[in-house]
């Protein structure tokens, strides 16, 4: 192997690293339980004081919504 090949290491994106770290922290806080994670995230939404918008589900393609 050449010296250059030994010294080269993969480039890491700092944003991706941060997002993965936050994801791991959130999952650990919820005990790796998806329902608990959703509950914690909704609780955080309410605590933020911002308006939360919930959209109606889209009808399946090819079918129109019945009003």
Image (cartoon, rainbow, N blue to C red):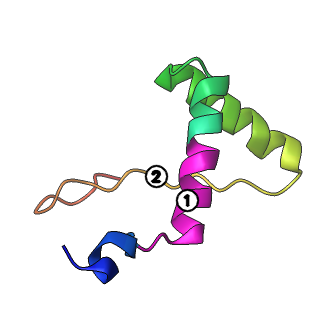
Is 13 magenta? The answer is yes
In the image, farthest residue toward the left: 62
Read off the residue under disc 2: 56
Give the label on residue 1, or none: none
Residue 51 x/y as whole percent: 79, 57
Using residue 49 as the reference point, say whether residue 26 is left or right of it. Answer: left
Which residue shows up at 66% across the image and 38% down it? 41
Quarter of the image with the N terminus is bottom left
Within the image, what quadrant is residue 60 found in?
bottom left
Please give the range of residues in magenta: 11-23
Is 8 magenta? The answer is no
Within the image, what quadrant is residue 45 found in?
top right
Closer to the camera, 57 or 20? 20
| SS type, badge 2 | loop
For discs 2 and 1, the disc positioned in front in the rendered view: 1
Give the label on residue 17, or none: 1
């Amino acid at each position: 192997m050449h010296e250059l090949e030994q010294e080269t290491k993969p480039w890491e994106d700092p944003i991706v690293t941060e997002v993965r770290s936050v994801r791991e922290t959130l999952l650990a806080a919820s005990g790796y339980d998806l329902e608990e994670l959703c509950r914690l995230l909704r609780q955080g939404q309410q605590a933020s004081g911002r308006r939360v918008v919930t959209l109606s589900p889209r009808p399946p393609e090819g079918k129109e919504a019945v009003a």
